[in-house]
Image: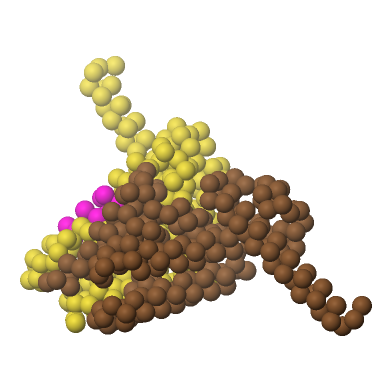
Chain colours: A brown, B yellow
């Protein structure tokens, strides 16, 4: 085989690998979202992704690592959907409302809470969680800054700290509302109430 | 036996029951705090409390119910300790700092996070979590209001909503910091940073 042909084959294999990996993450996320970590077998995930169980071990090593990576990817997608929804807002208050209305009722929060609880006891998974939050804050901050400039809204204090606090609150509220039998609508109204504590202080 | 003697015996039995129950909760909390739900056997808890395993079933029905009640009780104690520490503060800012320094590094947060994750999937345990948060906010609000009046600090907006948000943030931050390999000192500084977002907005 010529060197060119070898390189072509390597590229094709890598691309195929990426596609299988991505399909496994999609299938895993869908199953984990409805049944949680313990409720899904590796063989089901492989079947959903048209792959072999051995490919899961090859790409992710453990079920825990697959779970955490699938949850992290869903969280970043949720962040992007929230920014898209907020981009249609007419003013700063409705920008915040749009973020809340997309994030607070999402089942991705419960998925990520389970992933964080798992990672707590597993040193090898903390790195991925840390990188995911880093990216989530960066993308949220960048999206808001672009919108702010485009709309001529006044600059705020520390946008990265505000983004971080938004997500910490969303997870804290999701955890509590889920544990007290509340539904997605309650999570939204609780999150809006928490955001209004700031607004009322600003208005003083 | 006279009616008086029967009543005396009933009272003594009830008091003994309350004491056994309380001892079981203390023993359970201590063990669960270090090893989590799955790491502790019912027989160990009984031994730690000088009781029989059958008494756990009698007083709490399930290990899950014992775990959730022990975590809820620890959370209320943590709230009380935080108010005691904050009561020594010289001004409003250091009142908030004292709350954060007591709550954010406490292992009780991780215990309660596990209890909330458990209750999420168990309808029979949500009631106890809901009542615990209700009491936590009420006691926090009452303690702050008393301090405010005593010191002549200005009235704030919705004190109950502020207390609720404080705890939602504490849990969200504990969850994230634990999952990204951070320690108790990081939890404290992250919580202070989140509280400063308000302060900087107020200062504008």
Chief SS of the magenta region: helix
Q: Residue at x 13, y 66 (%)?
A: B156
Q: Identify the image quadrant of the C terminus of chain B.
A: bottom left
Task: Identify the residue at horizontal 49%, vertical 41% (top origin).
Answer: B63
Foreground: B1 or B193? B193
Image: B84 above or below A174: below
Q: In this view of the protein, can residue B91 be seen by the observer? A: yes
- Horizontal side, residue B104 vs residue B97: left or right: right
- Residue at left 20%, top 57%? B160
**Residue A111 on the magenta span:** no
The answer to whether residue B94 of the structure is visible from this angle is no
Query: How far across and down, in percent of the image, does residue B196 sit?
Result: 28, 77
| Rendered location of residue B183, percent (x, y) | 47, 73
| Residue B2 horizontal/vertical position (percent) | 25, 17
Q: Quadrant of the N terminus of chain B?
A: top left
Q: Nearer the viewer, residue A12 or A100?
A: A12
Q: Quadrant of residue A144?
A: bottom left
Numbered range of the magenta stretch = B133-143
Q: Quadrant of residue B100?
A: bottom left
Residue B140 falls inside the magenta stretch:
yes
Q: What residue is rendered at 26% in x and 68% in y?
A: A90
Task: List x then y, in percent, for residue B187.
Answer: 41, 72
Please tell me which residue lies in front, B166 or A154: A154
Q: Looking at the picture, does residue A76 appear above or below residue B202?
A: above
């Amino acid at each position: 085989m010529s060197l060119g042909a070898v390189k072509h084959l390597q590229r094709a294999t890598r691309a195929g690998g990426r596609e299988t990996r991505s399909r496994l993450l999609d299938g895993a996320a869908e199953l984990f979202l409805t049944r949680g970590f313990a409720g899904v077998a590796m063989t089901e995930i492989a079947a959903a992704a048209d792959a072999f169980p051995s490919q899961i071990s090859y790409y992710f090593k453990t079920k825990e690592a697959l779970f955490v990576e699938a949850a992290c990817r869903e969280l970043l997608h949720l962040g992007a959907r929230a920014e898209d929804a907020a981009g249609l807002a007419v003013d700063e208050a409705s920008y915040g409302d749009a973020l809340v209305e997309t994030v607070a009722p999402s089942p991705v929060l419960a998925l990520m809470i389970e992933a964080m609880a798992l990672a707590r006891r597993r040193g090898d998974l903390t790195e991925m969680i840390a990188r995911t939050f880093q990216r989530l804050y960066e993308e949220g901050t960048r999206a808001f800054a672009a919108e702010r400039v485009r709309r001529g809204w006044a600059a705020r204090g520390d946008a990265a700290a505000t983004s971080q606090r938004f997500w910490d609150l969303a997870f804290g509220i999701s955890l509590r509302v889920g544990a007290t039998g509340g539904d997605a609508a309650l999570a939204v109204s609780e999150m809006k109430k928490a955001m209004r504590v700031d607004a009322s202080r600003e208005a003083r």
